[in-house]
Amino acid sequence: MIMTRQNQRIPIVPFLEAAVLALTVAGCGVLTAKAPSSARPHARVSAAAVTLQKHLKNSWWYPPAVTKHYPTTEVAYHVPSPVGMESWQGNPESALLTTLNHVFQATTVAQVMAYSDPSFWGRISKQWQFPRGHRSKYGVMKEPLTAQNVQMMPATDSPYAAVIRRGDGDFVLTHSWAIAVGEPGNVFSTWYKKHPALTPWLYFVDVRGHWLLYSIQN
C-alpha cells in the first residue's frame, strides 16, 4: 500500500525489479539531477531559455527550465518550471509506465528528450550516446517493463525525497512521482533485496497531462 497526497491508500502490487536503462551513458556519466553542492540553493531563480528541438512540436509541454544557484559555489543548475505542472490525480501508474517504456526503449537522444523535462536535456545531450557503445553501462531495453518489474510511489515517499526537496524545491517534490526500475523477467522485490544500490530511481512531473522525466537518483 502507498499513501496518496490526499492521505488515501492506493493498493500497489509489490513491484519488482531493477535497472536496465534503455539509454547509453557516455563514459557512465553522472545520472542524477543533484546539483554540485549539498548547500541550500539561493531563493533567486530565473527562467533558462531552452530552444525547442525540431522534433518537439508541442511547446505546451516544455516550459523553459528554471535556473538556481548554490550559495557557496554560485554554480548554476536547472530544475523543472512550475508553469503547467499539475498535481497528479487518482493513480497515474499506468501512464507513468507507458512513459517509462518510451524512455527505456529509445534509440536516439531526440526520443529521450520528448519524454523529459527541459531541465534534464543538458544531461541527455552531453552524457548519453546512441547507438550504444560497447563500453556502455546500460543497454537499450528490448522488452518493455511491466508493473511487476518496478515500484512506483509519490516522490514524497521515496528514499531520495530529501535530495529532490533540497535541490528542486518542495513544489516540484510534491508534484512528482518516483519509479524504482527493475529488469524485465524479474520480480522487483526479489532483485532489490540483492542489489539495492544498483536500483535507479526516476522522478517524473506531470506538465499539462504529459509526464516528463527530470531526475535519476541511485
Image: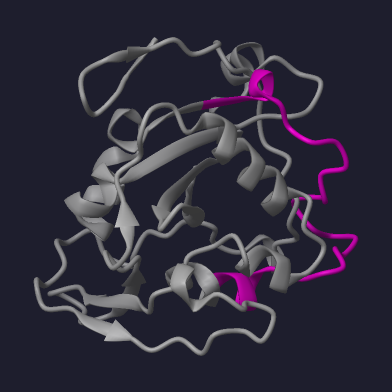
Magenta run includes residue 128: yes
x then y, percent, for residue 207: 41, 58
Quadrant where the N terminus lies? top left
Q: How many marks?
A: 0
x then y, percent, for residue 173: 27, 46
Residue at position x 82%, y 44% in the image: 141
Residue at position x 49%, y 78% in the image: 59
Colour pattern = one colour
Work out whether residue 34 or residue 101 is closer to the camera in this orientation and state it: 101
Q: Hey, which quadrant is residue 38 in on the image?
A: bottom left
Magenta run includes residue 88: no
Q: Is residue 57 above or below residue 18?
A: below
x then y, percent, for residue 8: 26, 15
Main SS, magenta region, reads loop
Region of the chain picked out in magenta, as a range = 123-151
x then y, percent, for residue 179: 51, 35
Q: Is residue 207 left or right of residue 185?
A: left
Residue at position x 66%, y 64% in the image: 112
Q: Is residue 200 above or below residue 6?
A: below
Q: Is residue 70 left or right of residue 35?
A: left
Work out whether residue 57 or residue 149 is closer to the camera in this orientation and state it: 57
Q: Is residue 171 above or below residue 77?
A: above
Residue at position x 69%, y 80% in the image: 55
Work out whether residue 23 or residue 12 is closer to the camera in this orientation and state it: 12
Q: Is residue 108 left or right of residue 64?
A: right
Q: Hey, which quadrant is residue 4 in on the image?
A: top left
